Structures are given as C-alpha cells and as structure tokens.
Amino acid sequence: MKAIFLVHNVGISDELEELLKKVGIENFTRWERVQGVGQSSGPHLGTHIWPSINSALFVVADDEKAKVLLEGVRQLRTDPLFSKEGIKAFCWDITEIT
C-alpha cells in the first residue's frame, strides 16, 4: 500500500478527480485552500498580490493503482495546458492501517 499526498492548483481539480476515477481510486481526503510556493508554479498564497490557491488530496492505494496515479500526475505536469498550474505528488509506503 502507498500513501500519496497531492498538492495542486485548484484550477486543475477536475482533471485530477478525473484521473482518480480513471485509476479506480474512489476514496480520498481533501484539504481546501492550501497555501504554498512551488519551484515551477510560484506563489499560491490566496492574497491580493498572489491570488492563486491550492488544494491537497491524500490517497491510500494499492501499489499498482499508486503507480498508475503517479504516472498520470507526471503526464499532467508535462502537459502544456497544465504545466504552469502546479501539481506535486509525494508518495510513501503504508505499513499499517488501523
């Protein structure tokens, strides 16, 4: 099992949810209005100077679905339509769920 933490511009929320459905991932936790500064996407701080804002998703999936999800995120990151929007995925092993 893998845990995947996805931080993304709210502008691509629909595309990310579509990716989750395509992979077969139905369960996730979402945080709205997440702020931060990305290396390629710049500040997403929700202020009048830096108005963009992020969301975050936390997903737990089996290894195969996680692999497909991460590949889909890589494709979104390189797609010219979305490459400047900002999306980052962090993945680690889950050893126990109680």
Image (cartoon, rainbow, N blue to C red):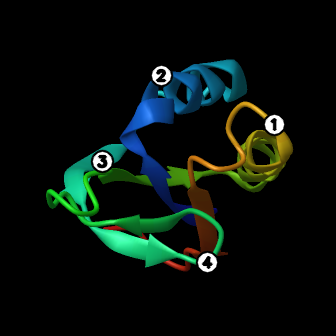
Q: Which residue is mark 4?
A: 39
Q: Which residue is mark 2?
A: 14
Q: Which residue is mark 1?
A: 80
Instruction: Determine the residue positioned at 64% across, 62% down.
Output: 1
Amino acid identity at mark 4: Gln
- Nearer mark to the viewer, of 1 and 3: 1
Q: Is residue 7 or residue 69 the one in the foreground?
A: 7
Q: Which residue is mark 3?
A: 29
Amino acid identity at mark 3: Thr
Which of the two discs, 1 and 2, labels the residue nearer the N terminus? 2
Which element type, helix, strand or loop, lies under badge 1? loop
Instruction: Determine the residue positioned at 25% across, 66% down.
Output: 45
CA distance for labels 3 and 2: 15 Å
Q: 41 above or below 79?
A: below
Q: Is residue 82 or residue 20 the one in the foreground?
A: 82
Q: 14 above or below 80?
A: above
